Amino acid sequence: MAIQADNIADLILQTQKDLGELKWTMIATNLQKYTMLPQLLKKDSVELQGGVGIQWNIQVRLTGSARMTGLYDTDSISTQDVNIVASVPWRHATANYSIDERAIKMNSGKYQIINLLKQKRISALTDMAELMEQQGWSKPTDSTDTDNAFGIPYWIVKNSSKGFNGGNPAGFPSGCGGVSSATYPNWSNWTDTYSAISKNDLVPALKEAWIKTKFTPPVPHPQYGTQPTVNNYGLYTVYSVIDGLEKLAQDQNDSLGNDLTKYMGDTYLFGRVPVTWVPYLESDTTAPIYGINWGEFKSVWLAGEYMKESPPVKSPTQHRTQVVFIDCTFNFICYNRRSHFVIYK
């Protein structure tokens, strides 16, 4: 059956009834907020590269040449390789929206209640936001998974032992970026656990993780990313942790008065570092808190493929239908795993 104007659901819904000009209510999304795409679109969190993949250098050892010496002592020359190369492959994502040319004409002028084309574009971009949220807060199943990006749980790995014990992610025996923590123990993130959201349990665990993941090189040198600071650091967790921390703050504040909303919100400060609620993490029953230095955790995009929106093209099977594609080639990388941590229940 041929599709006519009265068969197009969007056209009927948006042009028949007076719903208020050029506005609509969005209830199609599942999450209250999206943390990943807004972060990835920040200038400081994005890098553009070329080539068939993403790679960077890691110095894994010192030469060991420094020693105490005496007068006329014999030199001991130390020469060895100190660098290795980490790499990750590109991953690709796409979204699209389409509209019949005649529908555009019908949804115009005095008959236009909303901009149907604009709504379709925003829907496609929202689809991309949902996909990026899922990709950023998850990891591929294992090394044979060539579809999914290397999200935060791939780089920041849980371990019940306190310390730099976040080793190789499950399913990746060769390690993160092809570098194994079994071979190079310093290529590990900080880990810890907590039992209660209290000043004697979670609070000191957070404090220790924050202090011990801040590495300052003794000799300045060109390096990837930036050191963790209040401005580029973030803590990300579930609602129960946000709620517990706010109650702790309330209990310690004697000057609340009648302002019961002083500590109410989806972002709480811990030592001036924002603790942000991530709705996507609510399915994680371990109630994790991720500490991320966005100066060293980046999204890398293939140059020219950064949320690239193509010109409208005609559908090969519907000659009056215009289709626009939104494509990107990217992946997530962590330049220094030791600058990140995860604490969980």
Image: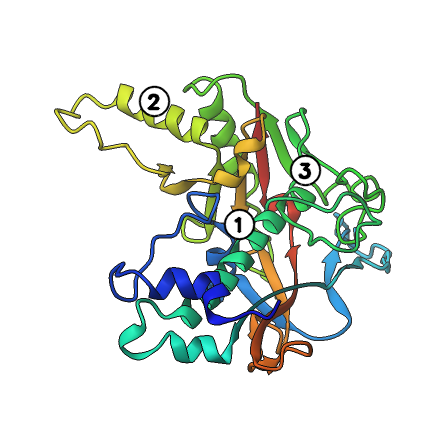
Which mark sits nearer the N-terminus, 3 or 2? 3
Which mark sits nearer the N-terminus, 2 or 1? 2
Query: Which numbered marker is on residue 157?
Result: 3
Q: Which residue is label 2 attached to?
A: 248
| Residue pictured at 49% horizontal, 58% vertical | 126
Q: Which residue is label 1 attached to?
A: 293
Question: In the picture shown, does residue 323 fall above or below 229?
Answer: below
- Residue 125: image x %, image y %? 50, 63
Any part of residue 223 in sight:
no
- Mark 1–mark 3 CB contact (< 8 Å): no
Q: Nearer the viewer, mark 1 or mark 3?
A: 3
Colour pattern of the rendering: rainbow
- Mark 3–mark 2 CB contact (< 8 Å): no
Which mark sits nearer the N-terminus, 1 or 3? 3
Q: Secondary structure at mark 3?
A: loop
Q: Secondary structure at mark 2?
A: helix
- The amino acid marked with disc number 2 is Leu
**Disc 2 from disc 1: Cα separation:** 25 Å
Q: Residues within 10 Å of mark 1 (few under 14, many from 20)?
A: many
